[in-house]
């Protein structure tokens, strides 16, 4: 049974008029956040407001870079060269880091978004592009990645610190990849299903879509802010972990 864990959420995922109500409701219950950097969502004003909200709530700030895919919300794989991908990630993380530091904070971690996260988890060339960009910014930066993934392995080899991530609201396949959002049952929206999956994480296991019980490493748990009822789920998850004597911390 785990004694402590980080609880993170993808935030600042707006473009244009920023409505911070949802984010402000989630923020008190999490220990770290991943802020959209403008390539799948988020604009400069949104980024500044989200950073300010995180600092107010003492929530650790992470950059959430993606493929340059506003229309697809960063959930489509793009055929970029290694140089293009490295530049895209470097640009986004640098922007988030600069804004955060200008407001008196510091960048805690980097977590790729959507298709970039999933593709880097299994594709060596993509993972190398992501890691090279992050190392340019800080050679011992913390990165959130799936355990035993290509991304986590390459990141560790490059000297980055890796925090093994699991997902509270996503169903897993038998190879421990996330079930595609194009398929039925990919997103867990009912509180009971989310809490059951959390209980498994605390014991180091996950039940896949096809019913297998597999071992899994969990150092940070992600809740997506665009999952239906995410604010209420954040509160439920926080209370569940606290009830089970698990300290919620970004340390």
Image (cartoon, rainbow, N blue to C red):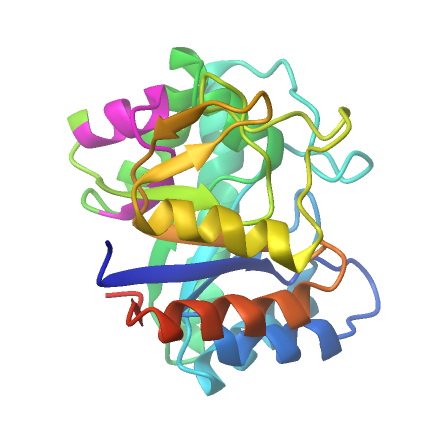
- The residue shown at (36%, 52%) is 220
- The residue shown at (84%, 69%) is 17
Which percent across, then down, holds residue 62? Answer: 43, 57
Horizontal side of 135 relative to 233 (left or right) equals left
Rendered position, 53 above or below 1: below
Please report the bounds of the magenta region as a residue range.
Answer: 141-156
Q: Who is closer to the viewer here, 34 or 190? A: 190
Horizontal side of 113 relative to 78 (left or right) equals left
Magenta span has 237?
no
Q: Residue furthest bottom?
A: 56
Rendered position, 53 above or below 222: below
Which percent across, then down, holds residue 242? Answer: 37, 74
For the C terminus, the image quarter is bottom left
Horizontal side of 81 relative to 225 (left or right) equals left
Q: Who is closer to the viewer here, 185 or 10? A: 185
- The residue shown at (65%, 59%) is 191
**Residue 241 in sight:** yes
- The residue shown at (33%, 30%) is 131
Horizontal side of 205 relative to 182 (left or right) equals left
Magenta span has 155?
yes
Which percent across, then down, holds residue 49? Answer: 62, 76
Which percent across, then down, holds residue 192? Answer: 62, 56
Quadrant assignment, res 178: top right
Rendered position, 242 above or below 57: above
For the N terminus, the image quarter is bottom left
Q: Who is closer to the viewer here, 58 or 28? A: 28
Q: Who is closer to the viewer here, 164 or 141? A: 164
Rendered position, 39 above or below 233: above
**Residue 34 in sight:** no
């Amino acid at each position: 049974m785990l004694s402590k864990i980080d609880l993170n959420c993808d935030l600042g995922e707006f473009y244009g008029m920023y409505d911070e109500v949802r984010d402000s409701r989630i923020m008190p219950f999490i220990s770290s956040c991943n802020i959209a950097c403008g390539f799948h969502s988020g604009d400069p004003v949104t980024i500044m407001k989200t950073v300010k909200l995180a600092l107010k709530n003492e929530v650790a700030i992470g950059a959430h870079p993606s493929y340059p895919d506003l229309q697809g919300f960063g959930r489509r794989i793009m055929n970029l060269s290694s140089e293009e991908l490295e530049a895209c990630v470097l640009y986004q993380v640098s922007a988030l880091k600069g804004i955060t530091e200008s407001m008196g904070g510091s960048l805690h971690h980097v977590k790729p978004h959507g298709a970039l996260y999933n593709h880097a988890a299994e594709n060596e060339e993509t993972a190398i592009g992501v890691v090279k960009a992050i190392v340019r910014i800080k050679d011992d930066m913390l990165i959130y990645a799936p355990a035993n993934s290509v991304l986590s392995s390459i990141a560790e080899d490059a000297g980055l610190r890796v925090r093994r991530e699991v997902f509270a609201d996503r169903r897993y396949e038998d190879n421990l990849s996330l079930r595609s959002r194009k398929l039925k049952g990919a997103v867990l929206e009912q509180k009971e299903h989310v809490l059951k999956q959390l209980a498994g994480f605390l014991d180091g296991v996950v039940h896949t879509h096809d019913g297998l019980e597999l071992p899994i490493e969990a150092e940070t748990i992600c809740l997506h802010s665009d999952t239906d009822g995410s604010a209420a789920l954040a509160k439920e998850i926080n209370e569940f972990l606290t009830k089970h004597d698990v300290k919620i911390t970004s340390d």
